[in-house]
């Protein structure tokens, strides 16, 4: 089966996730789908599999040996299955208590008069596993399988609906190298059988090893449509992924360089954590913005949590303003050492949605505001007023609930409470995910301003342009280790981004 | 456990491993049931094995089994139904009212009791799906409404002598086993068959086990929730019929004491509170164990207050055990 999609557009509130993407798939080939975080890969996969219907655009298919293209409408997962498109999502989609056989056949459980036909179900599952040349006990509950085996079950599940197109979303991110090898042997077998495989992966070495053609997405557009991978080398692919043009948002970030001999406000030396970090050494000086970049899952937020005392540090030394410290809790970090943490997950961790904005801002300094354990509303409101002005937060009054604000304003509230706390070090995790461009720019100037006032900032973001705009130095993490550091004094996107992407994929900087 | 055969195109044999039919929690429960029965028999000087005692124990096991299954069905989809107890009472009292006040024959009044359960269960399910409010809260509200309706049928009055035939049949035995107990066992077998073999039952378990996966495979989680609540209501209606058969009189308080047993049986029986897994055998065995606590209370003349304390503590213990076990599995 061949498939061609053209002009796919998908907008979410405030974001144009896909802006005219095209994709063409040929039978018997492996097609790599590449792009940086947020380029639109996941959205494209969700459109092809009916999780989110596209706003506009057409998807056409034609069966092998025919020339009769016809458009298909995919508005539900069932539509996708009927069109012959199967998917193995990044997150596991199996029913843990069900057997291997039942999970494989779940989409269309064979049944007669309302009863499940177990013999037919087991036969179907056995056929699918045989097609993959995989030997798994059909009656084992999938909860007892390893992650790698679960993945094979999911591929078999895609075959159960006669899929001729199989989408694999980051299939090897949780596999060992041996398990990944076996997975790719299965992929090769599917290819031999004339299936068309779409592979989404951040691991370029795997992509080059198994793929025939490649489509690269950037900012919701395809910048390379189905080119043979043999025409390209790694650095060409990286260039395509990262792009050259970068002009839209750049606040004035021409701060004088920080004195490298100053005592770091935050210094990590040889830190190892219970979460798996090894040999992490980095320093942030007052007035400096240090970026922490890496793939999702590289261990950046986990490192932040360890610094804040939420996860255990098992080796190495942590110094705040030159003094060695042991931080046991977030309260400890904030009140004793002046380290604030603006979380990635503001809905769940950063803002009390059911509380008034004034409470939200004052929460970090309640101890300071309290008189004999009692906090007067007025003292909270005074604190709020100051930051509403400074950050340009739009609220109807101090009694408004934080949950009623827009995402950007919630994020500002979340930031305001750390400003109120008067920190010396601020760890900022993904400050601008899901907020619009203008608020984003306002945020960027705010972060720069904080650094100008002498705050030491450790910035975690997956948004590469944002990182290059803001950070003075960028430390790159891969698999819970630091793979290198990129000086970024000039904030030139072109040169910095390429070095970063290479480090990010575990290579040494060129 | 598995390996990739070297030869290409090797065909996987459709083999089926024989497993010991009873495992895990069920095995522990069987052991507990046997041990406590023997202990109780010995300490009461064999009183438990007297035909009359055995009969009574089995008779009064019927309602706890069915009500436990009614709760289990909603637990399967990760929901709860607080209204099962009062719904049993409402079904019984409406049916009794039809027979006494309306002169309706039991042949119609009995199906009517079941129908009351089905309708109430359907309403529970539709409310949960339509409002998106947690099932716990929805059924807490309907529990209160149903308790009010139950009172409205006959105030504090008692219905007696609604059908001698029905009560006689309820008190009779076949092959030494009370008819109501046989009925409860048949219900349990039907529920087990439903979850094991029917498409609808498998869909409920898929929705409970992994709602996202279920949705992506084309299973409607909303439908599963409605079906689960409806089946739960149906079983509560059946329990109402058993109540009518067991006692010669029904009044407003019927069903008030069933809420804790309804949770105790499935939870001690090893049914996951988060949904996705059921155990009919475990639920029945746990209902028996809970029943034995009441028997022991009667045999030793213990203050009845202790019974609730013991059952409550065991339920809490069972939840803690299953939680620590889940923790181990995921780590």
Image: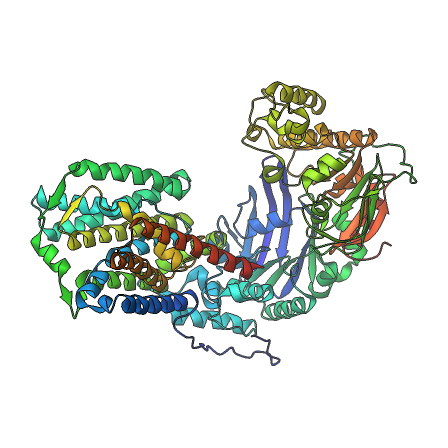
Picture residue at 89% right of the left edge, 32% below the top: A256
Q: Does the image show residue A67?
A: no
**Residue A249 percent location from the top left of the image:** 76, 33
Report the side of B3 relative to A424 (left or right).
left
Name the residue located 40 percent from the left edge and 52 percent from the top edge: B313
Asked if one can make out residue A44 in the rendered structure from this viewpoint, the answer is yes
Left-right relation of B23 to A274: left
Relative horizontal placement of residue A144, taking residue A172 as reference (left or right): left
Task: Count the marks.
Answer: 0
Q: In this view, does A48 lie above or below A350?
A: below
Q: Quadrant of the C terminus of chain B?
A: bottom right
Q: Where is residue A370 in the image (x, y as percent from the top left)?
A: 64, 25
Give the colour scheme shown: rainbow
Residue drawn at x 72%, y 65% is: A209
Quarter-of-image position of residue B179: bottom left
Q: In which quarter of the image is the N terminus of chain B?
A: bottom right
């Amino acid at each position: 089966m061949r498939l061609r999609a053209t002009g796919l557009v998908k907008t979410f509130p405030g974001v144009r996730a896909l802006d005219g993407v095209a994709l063409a798939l040929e039978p018997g080939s492996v097609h790599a789908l590449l792009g940086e975080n947020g380029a639109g890969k996941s959205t494209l996969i969700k459109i092809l599999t009916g999780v989110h219907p596209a706003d506009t655009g057409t998807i056409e298919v034609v069966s092998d040996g025919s020339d009769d293209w016809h458009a298909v409408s995919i508005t539900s997962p069932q539509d996708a299955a009927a069109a012959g498109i199967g998917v193995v999502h990044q997150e596991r989609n199996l029913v843990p208590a069900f057997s291997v056989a039942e999970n494989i056949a779940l989409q269309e459980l064979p049944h007669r008069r309302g009863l499940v036909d177990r013999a037919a179900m087991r036969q179907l599952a056995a056929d699918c596993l045989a097609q993959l040349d995989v030997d798994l006990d059909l009656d084992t509950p999938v909860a007892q399988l390893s992650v790698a085996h679960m993945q094979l079950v999911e591929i078999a599940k895609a075959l159960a609906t006669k899929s001729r197109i199989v989408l694999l979303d980051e299939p090897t991110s949780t596999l060992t190298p041996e398990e990944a090898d076996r997975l790719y042997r299965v992929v090769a077998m599917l290819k031999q059988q004339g299936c068309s495989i779409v592979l989404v992966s951040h691991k370029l070495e795997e992509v080059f090893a198994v793929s025939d053609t490649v489509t690269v997405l950037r900012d919701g557009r395809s910048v390379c449509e189905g080119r043979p991978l043999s025409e390209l080398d790694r650095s060409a692919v990286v260039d395509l992924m990262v792009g050259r043009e970068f002009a839209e948002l750049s606040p004035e970030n021409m701060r004088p360089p920080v004195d490298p001999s100053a005592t770091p406000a935050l210094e990590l030396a040889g830190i190892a954590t219970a979460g798996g970090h090894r040999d992490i050494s980095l320093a942030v000086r007052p007035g400096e913005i240090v970026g922490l970049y890496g793939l999702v899952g590289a261990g950046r937020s986990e490192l932040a949590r360890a610094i804040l005392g939420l996860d255990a540090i098992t080796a190495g030394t942590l110094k705040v303003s030159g003094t060695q410290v042991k931080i046991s809790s977030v309260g400890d970090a904030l009140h004793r050492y002046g380290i604030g943490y603006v979380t990635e997950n503001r809905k769940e961790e950063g803002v009390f949605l059911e509380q008034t904005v004034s409470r939200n801002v004052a929460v970090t300094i309640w101890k300071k505001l309290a008189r004999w354990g009692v906090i007067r509303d007025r003292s909270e409101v005074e604190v709020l007023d100051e930051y509403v002005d400074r950050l340009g937060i739009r609220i109807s009054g101090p009694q408004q609930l934080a949950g009623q604000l827009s995402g950007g304003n919630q994020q500002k509230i979340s930031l305001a409470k750390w400003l109120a706390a008067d920190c010396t070090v601020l760890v900022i995790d993904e400050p601008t995910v899901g907020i619009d461009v203008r608020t984003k720019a306002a945020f960027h100037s705010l972060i720069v301003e904080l650094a100008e006032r002498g705050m030491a900032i450790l910035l975690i973001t997956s948004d590469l342009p944002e990182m290059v705009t803001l950070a003075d130095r960028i430390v790159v993490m891969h698999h819970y280790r630091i793979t290198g550091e990129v000086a970024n004094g000039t904030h030139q996107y072109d040169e910095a981004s390429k070095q970063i992407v290479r480090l990010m994929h575990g290579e040494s900087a060129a | 456990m598995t390996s990739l055969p070297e030869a290409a195109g090797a065909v996987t044999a459709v083999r089926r491993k024989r497993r010991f039919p009873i495992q895990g929690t069920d095995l522990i429960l069987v052991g507990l049931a046997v041990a406590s029965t023997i202990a109780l028999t010995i300490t009461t000087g064999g009183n438990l094995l007297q035909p009359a005692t055995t009969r009574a124990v089995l008779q009064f096991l019927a309602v706890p089994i069915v009500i436990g299954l009614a709760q289990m069905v909603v637990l399967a989809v990760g929901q709860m139904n607080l209204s099962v107890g009062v719904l049993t009472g409402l079904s019984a009292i409406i049916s009794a009212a039809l027979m006494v006040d309306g002169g309706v024959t039991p042949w119609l009044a009995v199906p009517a009791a079941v129908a009351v359960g089905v309708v109430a269960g359907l309403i529970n399910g539709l409310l949960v799906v339509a409002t998106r409010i947690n099932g716990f809260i929805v059924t807490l509200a309907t529990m209160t409404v149903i308790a009010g309706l139950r009172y409205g049928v006959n105030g504090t009055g008692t219905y007696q002598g609604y059908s001698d035939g029905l009560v006689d049949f309820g008190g009779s035995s076949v092959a030494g086993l009370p008819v109501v107990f046989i009925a409860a066992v048949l219900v349990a077998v039907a529920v087990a068959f439903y979850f094991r073999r029917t498409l609808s039952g498998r869909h409920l378990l898929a929705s409970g086990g992994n709602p996202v996966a279920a949705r992506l495979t084309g299973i409607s989680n909303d439908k599963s929730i409605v079906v689960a609540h409806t089946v739960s209501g149906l079983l509560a209606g059946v329990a109402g019929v058993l109540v009518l058969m067991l006692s010669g009189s029904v009044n407003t308080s019927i069903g008030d004491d069933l809420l804790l047993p309804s949770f105790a049986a499935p939870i001690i029986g090893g049914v996951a509170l988060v949904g996705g897994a059921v155990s009919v055998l475990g639920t029945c065995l746990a209902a028996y164990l809970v029943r034995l606590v009441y028997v022991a209370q009667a045999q030793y003349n213990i203050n009845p207050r202790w019974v609730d304390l013991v059952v409550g503590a065991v339920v809490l213990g069972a939840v803690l055990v299953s939680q620590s076990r889940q923790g181990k599995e995921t780590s």
